[in-house]
Image: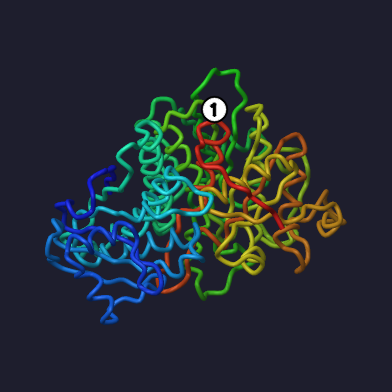
Amino acid sequence: MDFSLTTVSPERQAVPCVVCGVFAKRRLSEAAARLDHASRKAITGLLKRGDLEGRLGQTLLLHDLPGIAAERVLLVGCGPEEEWNEHKFREVIAKTGAVLAETGVTEAVSFLTDLAVPQRDLYWKLRQSVEVADATVYRFDRLKSKKDTPEQSLAGMRLSVPSNWEGPKLSRAIIEGQAIARAVRLAKDLANLPSNHCTPAHLAAQAKAVQKAHPAVKVRVLNGAQMKRLGMGALLGVARGSHEPPLLITLEYRGTRASAPPAVLVGKGVTFDSGGISIKPAAAMDEMKYDMAGAASVLATLQAVAELKSAQNVVGIIPATENMPGGSAIKPGDVVTSLSGQTIEVLNTDAEGRLILCDALTYAERFKPEVVIDIATLTGACVIALGAYASGLLGNDEGLCRSLLAAGTASGDRVWQLPLWDDYQKALDSPFADMANVGGREAGAITAACFLSRFTKKLKWAHLDIAGTAWRSTNKKGATGRPVPLLVQFLLDRAGQGEIKGNGDAG
C-alpha cells in the first residue's frame, strides 16, 4: 500500500473516504467536528440517534454527506478520552484498515494522526499508521487458484499533518514505515509458505534476491560438506533425518567502514519441525512450517536495513534445515560435538533449535561482532509464560537487553525479560557429555537460553524466544511478521537513526 502526507482540511478532501475519530459519549475529534460543521450538523444528528456511541473499535460509515467533498466518511470509536493511549491508537488504526479493506475503498485520508497520543509525537503516529494499516490489508493467497483479494482493495492512504509540518523528519517516518511494512510482509510470506515450498534452498534463494535488489548486501551459502569440514556437528546432527540438504546462509550488509564491528542477527531456520525421533503429536503439526520464523525475520530485517541505507554494518546468519525422523536421524541418547568443541547429549530430538543455533552462534565469532542477537521459535514454555503478546528476552549483557526492551516499547513489538541466573544451569548437567540439550519441565524457556549462553561467552549476546509471537493460531491463523519491527527499530537506534524513544521497563 502507498502512503503520503496531506495538509488539506477534511471537508475538502475529494477522495473515496475520509477517516476521523470519535471518543466515548459521542465527543467529536477536531477533524470530525470540522466535517460536522461543514455538513450543517449532519454527523451530530446521526450520533444523537444512537448510530455511534464512540466505544473503542466501533465504526460508522456515512455516504454523501452534504458539504463534504469525500464520497464517504468513516467514523471510528476511540473509547474514553482519558483512557486513550498508544496501544488503543494502534488498535484503532487496525480496525480502520480492516473496515476500509471490506468496503472496496481504494484510497482514504486518515485524520487519526491528528489525535494526541500521550508521550508520542507525530513521527511515531505516522510510522505506526503505516505499519499497522499495511498489516491489516495483508493477504496470503498465492497458493490459491481463486484469490482472496477483492477486485477493488485499499491501495493508498494519505495521512494528515499540520500545515507547518517538518518535511524531512515526517517524510522519513513514511519511508521507514513502508520499509518495515514490506519487511514484515516478506517475513509473513516466508513463514506462511508450506515446507514443500519453503525449503532451506528457498531461504537461500530469497537471501540472494535481497542481494540482487541491494548491492550493499553480500550472501554466502555453505553446504553440508563445508559445514562438516568446519565441525558443525550439532547442526548436521539435526539435519541427518531429512532429504533436504542443510545450508548455512550468511548475509553481510555494509553501510559504513569495513572496520566497524557489526550487529549479528542469528535466525533459527527449521523449515519443518516434526520433532524428529521424539516426534510431535499430530494435532497442529502443520503449523511447524513456521519454525523458520526466526530466519524469516533475519532476512526481512536485512532487507529493511539495506533499503533504508542504514549507516552501520549488519550480518545475518541462518542455519537452515528440516528436523525429520528416519533411519539416519539423530536419536535420543546420541552425543554430538558442536563447532565450539563442546559435546552435547541429545535427550530430546525435538529440542533441535538450540542445536542448530549453537553452531551458528559460534560461527558468528568470526565477524568480531559488537552485539549478537538470536531469534528463534524455541520453546513452548515461552508461550505458556508470556502468551502471544510479548517475546521472551534473555541475555548476558544488560545494556543490550535494555536497548531491546526500549526498541520493543517504541515499535509496539514488545519483549519481556526473563532471568538468566546460574542457578538454572545445573538442569543441563549430563553424565555422558559436557551438557544435555534439555533440562526438566521447569523453566523451559530459561534453560534453553542457558544452553545457548554456553556458546556465547565471548559475545555480547541476547536471545529472543518468539514461539508465542511469530504465529497466530486462532481463526486468523498465520504468521505475524514479528519481531521484524523490534529488530529494525533496535538497529535504527543503534545507528542513531531511530526517532522513536521508549522506556522499556523489564519485570
Q: Position of residue 40 (x, y in %)?
A: 17, 66
Q: Position of residue 267 (x, y in %)?
A: 56, 46
Residue at 55% x, 30% y: name it: 495
Residue at 74% x, 60% y: name it: 438
Left or right of 28? Residue 420 is: right
- Of residues 107 and 149, the one nearer the viewer is 107
Left or right of 186? Residue 245 is: right
Residue 108 visible (yes or no): yes
Quadrant of res 90: bottom left
Q: Is residue 22 above or below residue 259?
A: below
Q: Position of residue 269 (x, y in %)?
A: 53, 49
Residue 147 visible (yes or no): no
Disc 1 marks which residue? Answer: 313
Q: Position of residue 1 (x, y in %)?
A: 28, 49
Q: Is residue 337 above or below residue 140?
A: above
- Of residues 339 and 294, the one nearer the viewer is 294
Quadrant of res 386: bottom right
Residue at 27% x, 45% y: name it: 2
Callout 1 amino acid: Asn
Element marked by disc 1: strand
Residue at 40% x, 66% y: name it: 78
